[in-house]
């Protein structure tokens, strides 16, 4: 017969509680933070419009000078917008910008990208922001985003860039 070892229970210290303290969260600090965020919301509207305008400018420049540098600039503008759109409460902009990023990601491939598909992405982003579409379940925008994602995937697959 083997002798069973006693079970030892180890309770790690609650470091979060130690950091927060006994009193919990300071509700006045939380209210100040919420008020500050409300004030910034009006600035968010300006910031996303600036980001969309930057994307349009980069797209226009890419159409004029179809080269690695202009494509890299277009990619960076779409990448910035993808990252910031959720903060601006525009999840569909983030989704469309992510699709555009996927299309323009490899700037050294020398692949002729379909301008119509690039334009569709940029125009969709402009419309979503212009119309203030923030609902991620908006039927029209969701169908449009899905179709653009499908076309980007099909284009990249056709050219061996999956």
Image (tube, rainbow, N blue to C red):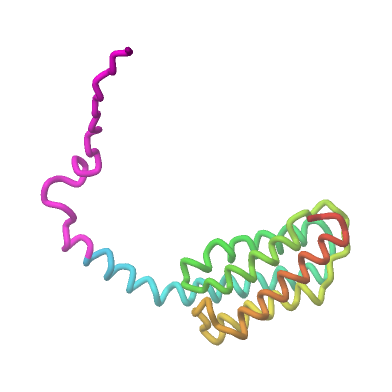
User: What secondary structure do most residues of the magenta stretch adopt?
Assistant: loop
Residue 131 lies, in percent from the top left, at 55, 87
Is 145 part of what is drawn in magenta? no
Instruction: Work out whether residue 134 or residue 79 is closer to the camera in this orientation and state it.
Output: 134
Residue under the point 81% across and 71% down = 63
Residue 57 lies in quadrant: bottom right
- Considering only vertical position in the picture, is 50 above or below 84? below
Q: Is residue 73 left or right of residue 7?
A: right
- At a point 82% along the width and 73% down the height, the residue shown is 115
Q: Is residue 134 left or right of residue 8?
A: right
Q: Answer with the quarter of the image where residue 7 lies.
A: top left
Residue sitting at 69 percent across and 62 percent down? Answer: 101
Residue located at (58% from left, 66% from top): 81
Residue 97: give x, y in percent of width and height.
64, 68
The picture places residue 107, in percent across and down from the top left corner, at 79, 54
Range of magenta residues: 1-30
Q: Quadrant of the C terminus?
A: bottom right
Quarter of the rendering occupied by the N terminus: top left
> Residue pushed farthest front?
1
Decide whether residue 19 is among the magenta residues.
yes
* Left or right side of 85 for 140: right
Residue 111: x percent and y percent? 87, 59
């Amino acid at each position: 017969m083997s002798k069973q070892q006693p079970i030892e229970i180890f309770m790690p210290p609650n470091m979060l509680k130690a950091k927060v303290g006994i009193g919990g969260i300071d509700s006045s600090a939380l209210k100040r933070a919420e008020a500050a965020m409300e004030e910034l919301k009006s600035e968010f509207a300006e910031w996303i419009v600036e980001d969309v305008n930057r994307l349009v400018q980069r797209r226009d420049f890419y159409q004029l000078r179809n080269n690695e540098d202009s494509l890299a600039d277009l990619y960076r503008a779409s990448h910035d917008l993808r990252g910031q759109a959720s903060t601006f409460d525009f999840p569909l902009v983030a989704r469309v910008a992510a699709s555009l990023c996927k299309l323009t990601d490899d700037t050294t491939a020398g692949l002729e990208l379909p301008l119509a598909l690039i334009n569709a992405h940029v125009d969709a982003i402009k419309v979503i922001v212009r119309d203030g579409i923030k609902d991620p379940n908006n039927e029209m925008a969701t169908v449009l985003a899905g179709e653009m994602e499908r076309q980007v995937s099909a284009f990249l697959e056709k050219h061996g860039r999956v």
